[in-house]
Structures are given as structure tokens and as C-alpha cells.
């Protein structure tokens, strides 16, 4: 089998390189607080159709009417009155997809990415070599009717589709950050796979690097029609160059009858990111949504991909790993709503916490009255590498009806001394023995990832373990 | 990081770490018609090295029990909340356990309109232990709302929380069970397990097993299983001549049996006859 | 018996010493378990350790390998003339010690193949090339009648007792240590395990004639295919008796009690 030419993403994880590259970009001053005027301005720059402007304004109203959530990590350091300063860089990016700023190119130089690969950085969206590969595949798929583009283009060229689906699954009234997203969203990906089309090679998205700050409210909308299949990879693997404080993206996935969608992400945001992302999938009869989710970066994350199993026999497979280190509070998990008979879900997660980091597994499994014979099994394991850290598990199961079968299991603990001794007795030194065990711990997740992401995850684990062991 | 929920007057108990509002599991309300300010309060101190048992049967209304176990004390409490139709109760239990002491609890919740219970055990001392077991049978549209918390603070403590229940006709139940490993509780072990049988279309079961940890040198495990009776086993029993109803009754009591076995004979008989009555009604 | 002892001493002086344990005292926390164990093992020799439950056999194995739970309070441990006591566990393994555990750890996420390859790299200090390694592993697994799919399974997870034993012996064959320590305290009860260990160790000896074996077992069948050079009987933390292979049948026939009496 011919492997598409891939470059490794390993270089990206040298976060330190990014950290020293933090440039303060000038932004023009505006009134504090998010106002109608600002929204109209964003909308004008983006050449929104009228209905989108109306949508934004309505979302703004909802945003002002909602309170911050009363649970989860403390996000009080996020000054909501200054939210406009987070939104502001948005205004600059309108249509500016072609240009890679000098400093980003410079960063890539420093990361040692070869000349040849840099040439493709000017391309649409992804700055990676792999994009060219996928782009050529895309042409092949285009003939079959597959649409893969950025959201702004989709809004222009596929207006009816966007209008039909946009923020119907995550309505702005869902929570304050969904409302914020509805008001100020910008960028993101749009994918449409027509009935019966199998997209064999994953589509990947790397929009966020293109214009610094643009991705913070990106919207991803994917529609996989009847009997079609797709693997979509969200490339949050490259740390954001221009550091912003808030990421409130939104992902809406529509999996139609008998369709399959795999959605893989490794998030490795810089350590001063508030990652308040909302992801949701609606799965129809016999459809399958597979989530593979790795959370390594950010200062605070709230991320709980939700699967609404709407049609009979709809299925969800969720695989997640979260690694929280110093200064991080990663609150992640999943939720599943069983809304039709014979729906089933498997949730499998691993969390690791070290050096004072806090990792929380939070989940909800809801079985409605309309979902007899629902099946769900949850397994989460937490590994703590020291006693400064925190690891919490907060699962909720809400089951109506008599025919559901729900199982939940969670474990918490540390690396066993006996296992370390065993490995050392085979000649492996202590640091490597620990690293092996941690890698083994996340292995069930790693094996679900595309190879280069698995490699990257291993590297992230190694990077995280360096200096804490021994 | 940890937020404390402000307890308003109508809130009876809350989980230590709130979660999504839409799930409605963060706190238990005081049952209608129960005044917790007028709770019957009792304080018990079990002196160092002493061994005591106490058997209580709770009636409608509120009651509160504060128990302190001094070093090496051993206290076994059984508490049966058996209510008649329309009655509601709120029972609260606060227990502190010192070095080497052991608290053992067996509870049952059957009948009535609404039963709310809060059990809070602090394993303060080193090698202190808590063995907390409970059963419930929800039927006749009643509501059972339980919030059990075991906090492990001393070194080498042991917590075990075992809950079994069955839900019939319109019953609604919430069980929140928290194991909280505080920093410094090195060498501690925590186990929590809930098994729920769903026996009617119109029941609602909510299970919230929290496990919180600020200590790496622990071994924590919790599990919940929610489901129906095993058809194969029902078939097997019927093949031996039992009627479907008898087989069902036998299977329900089989699930509750491990908890039942811990009661004194007197309480066991009471709980059992209460269960039998309700299961044969069904 | 005195004669064999003399013979042994003679042999010892000719053959190169591999392991020398002198007056070893060790224990857990405040409890002393080994109370002055001394024994010497030459290159290419097979020694057996016998002893009743609680006599310190498994402790001795763990101490030889440097299990952190045990504290050595007195005595010395030399391996090829080097002091082992100062070395951490993995250095001892790299020096050529291997312990087949009585109950090996289950480690999820690490495949058996990955485990052995990583260990081989650590022990040999050389990069182990994947393809030749796989070939070698496959051959070794065939010898042990192990299905090749076990290579991809997580280390000991969900393995039966016999399968775990095979996985240990497989590591022994692949790592080819200078000294194989085999803790077979319990495997006397398991027919399958007895077979695996007996054939596996015989194979190991054949391929590595210079390597030595120190094995805890009183099962004659395990030892059938091995030429036992020396037997040490451990009682109450000390070597109570030493001798040739005939000691094994003596103990099996008469138990340990008479040895104690003989000691006086």
C-alpha cells in the first residue's frame, strides 16, 4: 500500500520554541464589552448574508442573557467584559487566508522544517506538506461530489446547506460560549460527503495557523450523507503561534443513516489558552460516530464531545486521553444521549495528571424513554504521577425505562512499584520503565490514532515525563 | 479549585463537586412536608477501643445522627427507613472515624413518597475504616434520593461502599456516591459499587459515582451497573418449576441479599416482609 | 557427602566463579528474613535451592536482583567479581542476571514483543533490528509452543498460569543471561508449568552452556532434564545443608525436619 507522504508533526511539540516567539500584535482599541456594533463590523468584513448577520445579532442577545457556568474549572480569570479584545484579532483576518505572516515562516525555520515543505505553507488552510497530498485527493473526491472547504467559502458557495444545518445541533442558547461563538464565529471547515461516497483517506484541517487568532472561534460543520463514510482529523497539533486567551470553537457533525464518521483530534494548545470548545454529533439510524480525542495543551479545557444517538441502532465509540501537567486544569469527557431504540455507546478514557496539574473526567450518559435496549459501557482510568496533582471522576448516568444496560467502571491510582521492578529486572532503567508504563497506559488510545498522531502523542508523553522522573 | 455550593434552605445535601445543571443531580432537595430544622438529633460517641451496635428504624420526618468514633472503636449501625404510603423522610448521618476505628453501616430504604438520605463519613485517623452498605426498593412512584460521601484523610484507610437496588412502577431514584481521597491519605483503598435492577418501563434511575483524588498513593475503583434481570437465570428458575413471578421475586431478593445478610435478624425480617409485600403486589 | 563437598571445592577452584554470596543478611522493614546466607555458583553450573515455606528462598531471589522492598543489612554479593549491592536493579539485569518471577506482573499496553525488544536493547546495549529480532522471537516461541499472536498481546494480561510461565521462559531464551534465577516455588503444583520450565531451561542450557542456573524447586520433574551440580537447603534464613543432587530425593522422601535434627 502506498503511504501518502507525511511529515512528522513531532517538531511541533517543542513548545518552548513557540513560547519565546510570543509577539504582541497591535490591535486597535475599542469599547470594552461585546457590542452590536462590533458584531456588525465583523459581519460586514466577512461579507455575511443578511440571515447570518441576524443570526449573529440574535446570538449576541443570548450571550448577554446567559450566566457563566456554575460548575467545572474556575474561569474567573477570563474577564468577560474584555471579551472584545479576544474577538478583535478576528477583524483583521477577513479573507486573508493566503498570507503566512513572516514570523510564522520564521518559526518554521527554527523548527527545522525543510525548505521544500515550507513552500506549501502559502497554501489554503493547512500549512503542512500533507495538505498538498490531501488536496490532490480532494480533486478526485470533488468529482464524486465531496465538498471540503473553509466555512467562509461554504457560506458563499453552499449557502443553503449551511443555512439548513449551521448551529442547529449546538444552538446559541446552549451555553454562554456557544452564544459567543454564534455571534463572533470565524473560519473553520465545512465538509459534505454525498450519499454512498466512501472517503478512504482522512481529511485534515489546519486552518488556525493561517491567520493568527482566527481559529479561536472556528466553526466546523460536517455532513456525512446516507451510507457515506469519512475520517476527519482536526489538526490542533501545532501549537498556536499567536497566543490568544480564549478558544470557543464549535463542531457540528451530522451522521446520516448508515453513515460513519471518525473525528480525531489532538489538542496541544499553548499553556495560556482557555479551551472552551463545544463538539456535538447527531447520529441517525445505523450510523456510527467515532471520536478519538487527545487533550494535552491549554491552561484550562472544558471539552465534552456529545453524541446524540437519534436513530435506531445508532452507535458511538469514544476514545480519549487527557494529560494535565503544571498549571493545567483539563476538564474533559464525553456525553451520550440515547434517543432511539437499540442505540449503543462505548466510552473509553485515560487521564494522567502530574506536577500539580488537575485532570477531570466528566461524563453524562442519558437514556431517554424512547430508547429501549440502549447499551452503554464506560471505562475510565486515571493515573496520578505525584501527590501534588488532582484527578477527579464525575460521571452521571440518567436512565429512563426498563430495557437499558449501562455499565460504568473507573479506576484511579499510580504506577505500581512492582511493575517498575519487573521492568528494571529486565535491564530497563527506571525512567524508561516509567515512561513505558505510561505509554502502555495510553496505548489503547494511541492505537486508535493515525500513525503520525500516535507518534506525536508518544512524544508528548515523553516530553511531559522528562524531568519529572528519577 | 474546588467550589463549595452554597446550601440554601431547601437543599438537603449536595455532591462535593457540581456538574452539568441539565442533569439535575447536584443536590437533593428537602422532601415536601419534612422540616429539617425540627430534626430529631442524636449524638453518639464510641469511646476508644469500645465496640457498639445500634439498630434504628426511621419513621416519617427528619432525623440526624452525629457519631464520633474514638481510636480503635468499632461501631455497627443499621438503619431501616421503612415508610408507609405518602410518608416522607430525611435522614442525615455524620460520622468521624479516628485511628484504627471502624464504622460499619447497613441501610435500607423502602416505601413512602420520598426518602432523602445523606451519609457523610470522615476517615480522619490512620487505618480507619468505613464499610457502608445499603439497599433500596423504589416502587409506587416514590422518590429515593441518596447522597453518600466517604472522605479519606488518614493514612492507609479503607472505604467500601456497596449499594444494591431495584426500581418498580414509576420509581425515581438518585444515588450519589463519592469517594474522596484527600492529599496525604497514602496507602488508602476505596471501593464503590452500585447495582441497579430496572423492572418497569416508567422508572428513572440516576447514578452519580464520584471519585476525587488529590493523592497518588491510593487505589480507587468504582463501578455501576444498571440493567435488567438475566433472562437466562429466569428461564433456569422456571425450568425448575418456579412461576415467572416467583422467579422474578427470587432474583430481585438475590440482588439485594448481600446487603440483607448484614442486618440483624429482627431488622432483616422487617425489611424482608416489606419487600415481599411490594414485590408480590407488583 | 563430605567427599562431594570436597569435589565441589576442588571444582570451584578450577572453574570461574560467577556468583558469590557471603553472609547475606536482609529483610523487610524491621524483620530479618535472610540471616547470613552464603553460597557460591560457578560458570555453567546448575544449582537448586530447597527449603520449607518462609525459609527465605523467594526473598533471596529478590535480594539478588535488588528488589527495593528488601534491605540488605550485612554481607556481600559479588557477580563476576563485581559488587552487586551497589547496583540498581536494571544494572544487575544488564550485568547478566535474570529472574523468572513466581507471579509475573501484568502490564497493560506493553506488548510482549515490545517488552522483550526493549529489554534486549537495554541488556545488550545495542540497537536490536526489528526483522532479525522478529525471526528470532518467532523461533523461540515455536520452541515453547507459543502461538505467535502472544507476541502482540499485552504483557501477561489475561494470561493463564502456564502462559505466564511461557512468557517468562521466552524472555529467558531471548535475553540469554549469564545467570538465570528461577523462582518455581509454586509451579510444582502445575503440570503444564513443570513441563514448560523443564524444557525451557534445558533449551536455555543447551544454547548457553556457559550460563548458570539457580532454581527454587523441589520438583524432580523440573530437574529431570538438567544436570544438577549442587543443592542448597535454606532453612530459617540460612543455608542449613549443602550437597549434590541426592539431597533432592532425601528431602522429598523425608522432608526438611530430619535435616534440622541432623543440624542439632
Image: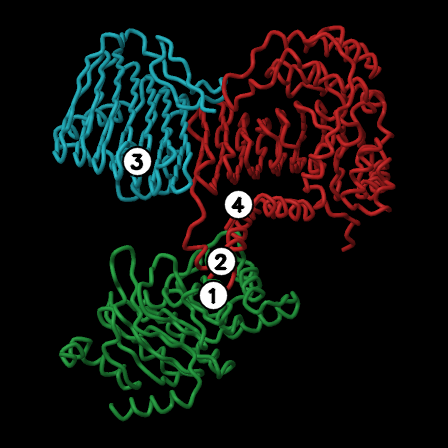
Chain colours: A red, B cyan, C green
Name the residue tied to disc 1. C167
Marks 1 and 2 close (CB-CB < 8 Å) = yes
Query: Circle 4 sits in a helix, a strand or a loop, which is it?
Result: loop
Which chain does the numbered disc 3 sit on?
B
Disc 2 to disc 4, C-alpha distance = 25 Å
In this rendering, the label closer to the viewer, 2 or 3: 3
Query: Circle 1 sits in a helix, a strand or a loop, which is it?
Result: helix
Disc 2 to disc 3, C-alpha distance = 35 Å
In this orientation, which residue lies closer to the viewer: A197 or A333? A333
Q: Residue at x 87, y 30 (%)?
A: A98
Task: Note whether A33 is above or below A311 in the view shown.
Answer: above
Name the residue tied to disc 4. A468
Which chain does the numbered disc 2 sit on?
C
Give the crowd class for mark 4: few <14, some 14-19, many >=20 residues within 10 Å: few
Marks 4 and 1 close (CB-CB < 8 Å) = no
Disc 4 to disc 1, C-alpha distance = 32 Å
In this rendering, the label closer to the viewer, 4 or 1: 4
Name the residue tied to disc 2. C155
Give the crowd class for mark 1: few <14, some 14-19, many >=20 residues within 10 Å: many
Residue C1 in the image, given as x and y percentages of width and height:
24, 90
Q: Are marks 4 and 3 on the same chain?
A: no
Name the residue tied to disc 3. B154
In this rendering, the label closer to the viewer, 3 or 1: 3
Amino acid at each position: 500500500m502506498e503511504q501518502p507522504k507525511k511529515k512528522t508533526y513531532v517538531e511541533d511539540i517543542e513548545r518552548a520554541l513557540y513560547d519565546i516567539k510570543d509577539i504582541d500584535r497591535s490591535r486597535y482599541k475599542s469599547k470594552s464589552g461585546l457590542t452590536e456594533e462590533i458584531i456588525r463590523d465583523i459581519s460586514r468584513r466577512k461579507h455575511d448574508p443578511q440571515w447570518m448577520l441576524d443570526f449573529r445579532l440574535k446570538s449576541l442577545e443570548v450571550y448577554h442573557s446567559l450566566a457563566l457556568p456554575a460548575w467545572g474549572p474556575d474561569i474567573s480569570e477570563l474577564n468577560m467584559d474584555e471579551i472584545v479584545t479576544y474577538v478583535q484579532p478576528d477583524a483583521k483576518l477577513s479573507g486573508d487566508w493566503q498570507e503566512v505572516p513572516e514570523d510564522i515562516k520564521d518559526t518554521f525555520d527554527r523548527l527545522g522544517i525543510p525548505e521544500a515543505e515550507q513552500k506549501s505553507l502559502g497554501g489554503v488552510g493547512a500549512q503542512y506538506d500533507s495538505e498538498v497530498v490531501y488536496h490532490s485527493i480532494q480533486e478526485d473526491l470533488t468529482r464524486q461530489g465531496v465538498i471540503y472547504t473553509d466555512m467562509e467559502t461554504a457560506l458563499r458557495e453552499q449557502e443553503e446547506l449551511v443555512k439548513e444545518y449551521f448551529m442547529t445541533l449546538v444552538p446559541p442558547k446552549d451555553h454562554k460560549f456557544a452564544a459567543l461563538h454564534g455571534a463572533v464565529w470565524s473560519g473553520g471547515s465545512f465538509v459534505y460527503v454525498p450519499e454512498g461516497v466512501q472517503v478512504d483517506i482522512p481529511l485534515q484541517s489546519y486552518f488556525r495557523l493561517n491567520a493568527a487568532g482566527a481559529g479561536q472561534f472556528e466553526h466546523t460543520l460536517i455532513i456525512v450523507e446516507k451510507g457515506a463514510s469519512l475520517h476527519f482529523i482536526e489538526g490542533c497539533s501545532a501549537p498556536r503561534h499567536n497566543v490568544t486567551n480564549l478558544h470557543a470553537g464549535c463542531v457540528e457533525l451530522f451522521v446520516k443513516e448508515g453513515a460513519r464518521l471518525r473525528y480525531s483530534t489532538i489538542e496541544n494548545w499553548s499553556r495560556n489558552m482557555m479551551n472552551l470548545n463545544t463538539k456535538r454529533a447527531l447520529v441517525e439510524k445505523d450510523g456510527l460516530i467515532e471520536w478519538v480525542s487527545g487533550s494535552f495543551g491549554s491552561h484550562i479545557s472544558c471539552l465534552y464531545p456529545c453524541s446524540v444517538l437519534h436513530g435506531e441502532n445508532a452507535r458511538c465509540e469514544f476514545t480519549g486521553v487527557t494529560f494535565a501537567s503544571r498549571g493545567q486544569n483539563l476538564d474533559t469527557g464525553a456525553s451520550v444521549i440515547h434517543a432511539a431504540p437499540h442505540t449503543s455507546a462505548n466510552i473509553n478514557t485515560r487521564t494522567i495528571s502530574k506536577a500539580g496539574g488537575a485532570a477531570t473526567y466528566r461524563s453524562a450518559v442519558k437514556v431517554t424513554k424512547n430508547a429501549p435496549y440502549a447499551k452503554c459501557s464506560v471505562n475510565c482510568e486515571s493515573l496520578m504521577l505525584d501527590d501534588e496533582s488532582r484527578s477527579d471522576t464525575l460521571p452521571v448516568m440518567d436512565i429512563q425505562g426498563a430495557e437499558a444496560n449501562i455499565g460504568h467502571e473507573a479506576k484511579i491510582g499510580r504506577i505500581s512499584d512492582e511493575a517498575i521492578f519487573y521492568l528494571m529486572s529486565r535491564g530497563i532503567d527506571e525512567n524508561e520503565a516509567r515512561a513505558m508504563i505510561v505509554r502502555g497506559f495510553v496505548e489503547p488510545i494511541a492505537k486508535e490514532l493515525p500513525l503520525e498522531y500516535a507518534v506525536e502523542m508518544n512524544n508528548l508523553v515523553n516530553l511531559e515525563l522528562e524531568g519529572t522522573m528519577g | 479549585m474546588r467550589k463549595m455550593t452554597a446550601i440554601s434552605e431547601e437543599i438537603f445535601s449536595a455532591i462535593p463537586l457540581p456538574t452539568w445543571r441539565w442533569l439535575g443531580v447536584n443536590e437533593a432537595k428537602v422532601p415536601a412536608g419534612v422540616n429539617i430544622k425540627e430534626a430529631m438529633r442524636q449524638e453518639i460517641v464510641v469511646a476508644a477501643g469500645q465496640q457498639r451496635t445500634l439498630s434504628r428504624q426511621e419513621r416519617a420526618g427528619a432525623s440526624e445522627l452525629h457519631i464520633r468514633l474514638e481510636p480503635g472503636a468499632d461501631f455497627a449501625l443499621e438503619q431501616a427507613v421503612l415508610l408507609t404510603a405518602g410518608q416522607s423522610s430525611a435522614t442525615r448521618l455524620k460520622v468521624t472515624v479516628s485511628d484504627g476505628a471502624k464504622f460499619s453501616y447497613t441501610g435500607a430504604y423502602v416505601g413512602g413518597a420520598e426518602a432523602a438520605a445523606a451519609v457523610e463519613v470522615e476517615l480522619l485517623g490512620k487505618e480507619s475504616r468505613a464499610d457502608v452498605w445499603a439497599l433500596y426498593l423504589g416502587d409506587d412512584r416514590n422518590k429515593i434520593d441518596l447522597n453518600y460521601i466517604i472522605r479519606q484523610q488518614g493514612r492507609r484507610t479503607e472505604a467500601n461502599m456497596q449499594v444494591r437496588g431495584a426500581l418498580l412502577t414509576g420509581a425515581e431514584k438518585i444515588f450519589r456516591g463519592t469517594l474522596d481521597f484527600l492529599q496525604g491519605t497514602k496507602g488508602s483503598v476505596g471501593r464503590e459499587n452500585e447495582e441497579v435492577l430496572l423492572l418497569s418501563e416508567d422508572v428513572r434511575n440516576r447514578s452519580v459515582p464520584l471519585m476525587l483524588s488529590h493523592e497518588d498513593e491510593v487505589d480507587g475503583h468504582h463501578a455501576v451497573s444498571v440493567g435488567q434481570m438475566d433472562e437466562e437465570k429466569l428461564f433456569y428458575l422456571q425450568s425448575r418449576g418456579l412461576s415467572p413471578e416467583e422467579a422474578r421475586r427470587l432474583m430481585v431478593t438475590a440482588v439485594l441479599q448481600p446487603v440483607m445478610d448484614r442486618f440483624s435478624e429482627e431488622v432483616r425480617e422487617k425489611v424482608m416482609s416489606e419487600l415481599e409485600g411490594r414485590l408480590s403486589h407488583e | 557427602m563430605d567427599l562431594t563437598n570436597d569435589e565441589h571445592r576442588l571444582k570451584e577452584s578450577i572453574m570461574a566463579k560467577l556468583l558469590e554470596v557471603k553472609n547475606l543478611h536482609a529483610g523487610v522493614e524491621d524483620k530479618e528474613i535472610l540471616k547470613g546466607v552464603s553460597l557460591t555458583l560457578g560458570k555453567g553450573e546448575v544449582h537448586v535451592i530447597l527449603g520449607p515455606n518462609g525459609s527465605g528462598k523467594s526473598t533471596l531471589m529478590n535480594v539478588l536482583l535488588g528488589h527495593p522492598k528488601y534491605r540488605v543489612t550485612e554481607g556481600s554479593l559479588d557477580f563476576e567479581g563485581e559488587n552487586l549491592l551497589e547496583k540498581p536493579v536494571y544494572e544487575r539485569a544488564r550485568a547478566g542476571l535474570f529472574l523468572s518471577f513466581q507471579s509475573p506482573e501484568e502490564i497493560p499496553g506493553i506488548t510482549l514483543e515490545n517488552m522483550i525488544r526493549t529489554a534486549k536493547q537495554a541488556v545488550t546495549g545495542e540497537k536490536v533490528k526489528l526483522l532479525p529480532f522478529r525471526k528470532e522471537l518467532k523461533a523461540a516461541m515455536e520452541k515453547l509452543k507459543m502461538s505467535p499472536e502472544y507476541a502482540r498481546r499485552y504483557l501477561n494480561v489475561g494470561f493463564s498460569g502456564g502462559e505466564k510461565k511461557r512468557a517468562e521462559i521466552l524472555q529467558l531464551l531471548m535475553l540469554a543471561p549469564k545467570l538465570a534465577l528461577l523462582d518455581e516455588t509454586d509451579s510444582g503444583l502445575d503440570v503444564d508449568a513443570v513441563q514448560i520450565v523443564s524444557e525451557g531451561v534445558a533449551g536455555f542450557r543447551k544454547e548457553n552452556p556457559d550460563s548458570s542456573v539457580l532454581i527454587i524447586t523441589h520438583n524432580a520433574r523440573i530437574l529431570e532434564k538438567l544436570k544438577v551440580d549442587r543443592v542448597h537447603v535454606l532453612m530459617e534464613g540460612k543455608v542449613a545443608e549443602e550437597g549434590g543432587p541426592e539431597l533432592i530425593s532425601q528431602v522429598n522422601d523425608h522432608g526438611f525436619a530430619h535435616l534440622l535434627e541432623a543440624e542439632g
